[in-house]
Image: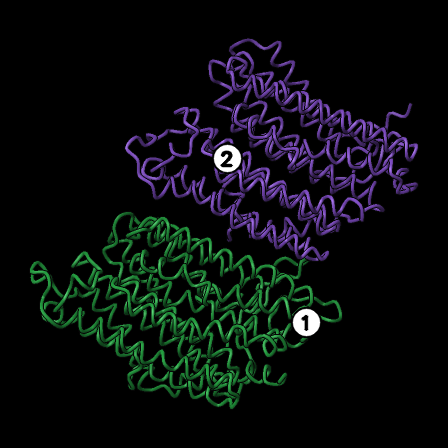
Chain colours: A purple, B green
Amino acid sequence: MDFSNFLWMRDELSLLAVILVLFLYDTFATEKSRRAFSWVACLLLAVQTAFLFVNPATGEAFGGMYQTSPVINIVKIVLNIGTLLVLIQANVWAKSPDMQVRRGEFYVLTLMTLLGMYLMISSGNFLLFFIGLEMASLPLTALVAIEKYHQLSYEAAAKYVFVALFSSSLMLLGISFVYGAVGTLYFEDIAASLVGTPLLYVGLVLFLAGMGFKISIVPFHLWTADVYQGAPTSITAYLSVISKGAAAFALMVVLFKVFSSVAAVWQPVLWGLIVITITIGNLFAVRQKNLKRFMAFSSISQAGYILLGVIAGSAVGMTSLIYYVLVYVFSNLAVFGVISVIENATGKVDMDDYNGLYRTNPKLSVALMLALFSLAGIPPFAGFFSKFFIFYAAVEEGFYVLVFIALLNTIISLYYYLLVVKAMFIRQDDCVIPTIQSDGASKLSISLCVLGVLLVGLISGIYSSIVPLSFGM
Amino acid sequence: MNFLSLFVLIPLLMMAGLALSRNMKQIRTVAVIGSSLQLVFAFIVLFMFLGERAAGNTAEMLFVADTVWYAPLGIHYTVGVDGVSVAMLLLSAIVVFAGVFASWKIDPLPKEFFLWLILLSIGVFGFFISINLFTMFMYYEIALIPMYLLIGVWGSGNKTYSAMKLTLMLMGGSALLLIGILGIYFHSSADGNLTMNILEIAKNNAIPHEMQYYLFPLTFVGFGVLGAMFPFHTWSPDGHASAPTAVSMLHAGVLMKLGGYGCFRVAMYLMPWATTELSWIFLILTGISVVYGAFSACVQTDLKYINAYSSVSHCGLVLFALLMWNTTAMTGAVLQMLSHGLMTALFFALIGMIYGRTHTRDIREMGGLMKIMPFLSVAYVIAGLASLGLPGLSGFVAEMTVFVGSFQWDDTFRRVFTIVACTSIVITAVYILRVVGKLLYGKVQNEHHRELTDAAWFERLSAITLIVGVAAIGMAPGWISNLISDSMSVISERILQYI
């Protein structure tokens, strides 16, 4: 066997090394030396992220089973940045008495799912794709249930595992239909011998449905709100950003690489899915009082915007999607950072609890406001640019009506994001949340996110450097 | 980046200064220094522009500078000014300057108030110096969002409702605009060199007619929402009535002009064919705005509502005049923008000052204020006279030019609409004189009002600045009208080719 194949997988191997080190550290270190565990985990991941920047290459291993390219590398970097921010944010929560004994598991499992996503987006074969997907979702079930004595967390985990298994089996069925129609599982071979037969279409639809569960596209979104509400806030943040971003990119790669010749079939389907995803997500978000449920529906509608990059099917579309995910990482994690600081200090997660927050916690309120403005697409924050570019990509391919519907939806989304701003800045309340002295880790993570929200849009180099690496159908 | 970007840079520095200031005195110092600098700079740009023109530089836009921003998407940061933008920049600088003094004693959270107000002004200044569709749109949206918090936190009355309504309706306008802009961009050139630069799009003139049919209404309505075009004007009365003084001034005085400015700079200039084809629909709508706004103002009893509806009527006239295409009417439209900007800012400033003393804006509860606060009352009368078009003040110059221009057409449709719009002058006189008579003359309604004081120095400064502007346009309209018609004739001739 030619072991040089493994050299192509240096991203995965380096992450695996980090996981192993952390696992051994957690298992064998003394109680006292484990105190720095969280920071060591963050540091190792940061080093690994820096390693990803080094000399990305294009190549494939194991006969095309595994593929890598600079653009895939960039997606991995984006996922890493998000994970790193989540880990920093989770610092306080992971130190809490309840979590003390399970802290190591939290970090190891989180990085395991990240490894699964790496494999998923690097795969050149449906089998590896499926393994990566499973590796990304099964540890997540454990993570959702990690506060196992909380009933909501427990319930959320049960829902999540059922949905995850159901969607996996749908996808597996879809993949086997595709195999039945074409006779191979390699992406390139399928693309080469693709014929539009009914069997293939059924396979494609089942595959789309399976991915729909992962990205939480309407009508496969019903688990989202409950799981987001029940899971610990850091896990929710991870689910809403990293897991979704990776799945969206993987979907795009498969649709571009494998199914590009039947684009006429899946584009109308995706068109409809985007419209209902954005609309339903927005309409339900309006009614939410619990901020975690609120963010769940907001993230559903954001998934719809992300898919606009997929339907465009061009290199600009791919770049805009990656860029959108990057901006979404910063904005959404800033929101979850503030939510988790307040939840950890007071246990409050309802919108009404935030009334008058600006008077007592001006910095947290401003951070949350900027992040929400970015999510709503208000300039000069990064969200404006990412929304503009993703609309640009869709309009370039002639999807005027679709973009128009998406734009009308931004008005609804602005409405509910402003509800939170209104609670913090305009409303007054007798029992305001007292001034919170937030810890260093949360401060660091929220400041990094806000910095991202402010700068990523204005600095054009980030977008421009992804463009030449991307590819279209 | 060239010196025009200072219009954005000065407010940015102001915001940094504000963020660092610790007490009211420092906040005021920063705000006054910043807005004065801005005003001086606006005058410098005006004189530089006049100097260049006098030296024979006949380029359409002067001081053009282009910086590549997002190269793969054809997005540049392009600035440049013509006569109209110079005039609008001057107007904005004057209103911001007056607005700072009008909110001298803002409470609570003065620092935050000025931060948001200055952010709003960044949007306005940036919009007027941009000649690139992307940056124009970006600055337009920057100007929208501070309104929500400015009205929501510092407003009065039904403020959360008004703030939300205003923000969402204007956001709706910008949604139409965004798709319009993208549509224009992707058809901006026949040979594949797509551009967002307005001058180049106009030069290429490559937008197919069937696309103009969709894109013109999208962009015109998109900007028209901000210009309070009927039936998309409903945000305006509520928004202006609830907003704090300086915000009403800036919003009615300058921000609504963004709408009119965008209408001719983007919709009409870039799509002249569709302008000639579709103008009649919008002419009807704006005609309704003019008359309907004036009639609504007649029956209001809240001072701010009266003025807000009057703004609907006057801003309707701006769009109405633009849709008449000939140079005279379009020059009148810009004159009306300037005149209305100064006059309505003066109105809102005075209303704010009166309300700060009497704590009511209902004209039925006030009377005889002339004896109690003579300065404010005289200023109010001057604003009123400018509004109803008394010769010697700015309103006369503007409306005269508009109606002369409109009546130059000899077809029945336009003539009838011109006559209908003309009636608004009479109706304006009715509601202005009604307010002046009720509010300033007659018996003192409330004995407590006798103890009230007249304007303080900062209030006088704010009002006098605006009155000087109103009188300057009214008494010496020649130079500014030449400045405008010089640039407007380019747009006008471009449209007239197509009939």
Measured as percent of width and height from the top left, residue B129 is found at 49, 69
Q: What amino acid type is highlighted by mark number 2?
A: Phe
Is residue B488 toward the left or the right of residue B302 in the image?
A: right
Measured as percent of width and height from the top left, residue A128 is found at 80, 28
Measured as percent of width and height from the top left, residue B176 is found at 56, 60
Indicate whether A233 appears above or below A199: above
**Proximity of marks 1 and 2: CB atoms separated by less than 8 Å:** no
Q: Quadrant of residue A428?
A: top left
Chain hosting mark 1: B
Q: Residue at x 77, y 25 (%)?
A: A131
Chain hosting mark 2: A
Callout 1 secondary element: loop
Q: Nearer the viewer, residue B237 or B184?
A: B237
Q: Nearer the viewer, residue A339 or B252?
A: B252
Indicate whether B114 appears above or below B306: above
Q: Which residue is mark 1?
A: B207
Q: Which residue is mark 2?
A: A294
Q: Nearer the viewer, residue B236 or B86?
A: B236
Q: Residue at x 38, y 88 (%)?
A: B478
